[in-house]
Amino acid sequence: MEADAITITADAIEEYGSGSKLMRVALALLVFALPKSVGAEELPLNSAVTQETIATTICVIGWTKGIRPPASFTNRIKRELIKELELPEELLTDFELDHRIPLALGGAPSESRNLELQPWDEAGEKDAVEACLSRAVCSGRIGLDEARQRIWRDWRHVGMDCDGR
């Protein structure tokens, strides 16, 4: 990530104030944009999904519907995250609760480390990356662990390379 993309200048803090709604949103998004390094054994994963089980789990159309947490759970977590970040509750509609490692790659359905707020304007782009990685895993072009590591580190840099080329 380029330094310009994550710099919050002293001028901006002075102009908007460190406690302003705009600044809190910028800081919250910055936290989510930073890549996180974690070893494969530490990733928040669904233990039922391994390279050996993909043909009967994630590569089965509709499989994730059966493990997706209910809206009552995800809405509660979303409100808690908004509150933790000290953002106004009216911003709830600006975000979706996203699985950092998607269910389609065997991410843990309800583990807090795998859940984060994602601005709606990024959701479609990340969904496309998730679908591409899932197709690549199910077709054998890349391994499941590699796909998980790529999306965990920073989904924005997976891009067109998600098919393993």
Image: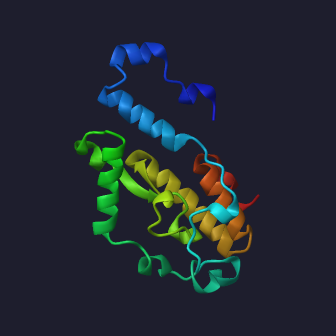
Outermost residue to the bottom: 56
What residue is drawn where x is 74% and y is 69%?
141
How is colour applied across the structure in the image? Answer: rainbow
Q: Locate residue 11: give its quadrant.
A: top left
Residue 159 seen from this side: no
Taking 24 as reference, is 64 left or right?
A: right
Residue toward you, 129 or 73 = 73
What residue is drawn where x is 50% and y is 51%?
125
Q: Locate residue 133: give its quadrant.
A: bottom right
Q: Quadrant of the N terminus?
A: top right
Give percent across and percent down for residue 162: 67, 58
What residue is drawn where x is 58% and y is 25%?
4
Decide: is 142 above or below 19: below
Give percent across and percent down for residue 90: 23, 43
Outermost residue to the right: 165
Give percent across and percent down for residue 119: 40, 46
